[in-house]
Image (cartoon, rainbow, N blue to C red):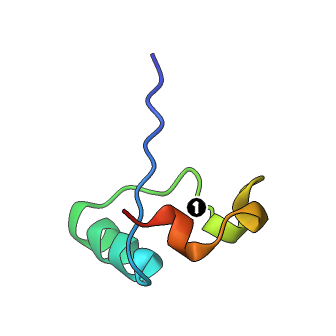
Amino acid sequence: MTINSYLNFDGNTEEAFNFYKSVFGGEFTTFQRFNETPQGGQMSEADGKN
């Protein structure tokens, strides 16, 4: 079974992930910014916020 999780942070995702990586270790298998996703250009920033 494979689990794909999607986490969103308000403006500091990469910084947060690098902090957690330094604390817990490990490596990123994939790091993709929202605007690099297939539908990233079709949604405004407001669409991704609740």
Left or right: residue 23 compared with residue 44: left
Residue 33 can be seen in this image: no
Could you tell me residue 18's position as x and y percent?
Answer: 38, 75
The answer to whether one can see residue 18 in this image is: yes
Question: Helix, strand or loop at disc 1?
Answer: loop
- Residue 39, image x and y in percent? 74, 54
Residue that numbered label 1 is attached to: 31
Foreground of the two, 11 or 24: 11
Q: Residue 17, percent across and down?
A: 38, 70
What residue occupies the far top of the structure in this picture? 1
Residue 28 placement, left or right of 21: right
Instruction: Determine the residue positioned at 68% across, 64% down.
Output: 43
Q: Quadrant of the C terminus?
A: bottom left
Q: Position of residue 12 (x, y in %)?
A: 41, 83
- The extreme left residue here reads 23
- Residue ID at (54%, 64%): 47
Q: Residue at x 76, y 62 (%)?
A: 42
Foreground pick, 33 / 40: 40
Residue 21, placed above or below residue 38: below
Q: Residues within 10 Å of mark 1 (few under 14, many from 20)?
A: few
Q: Which quadrant, please, contains the N terminus?
A: top left
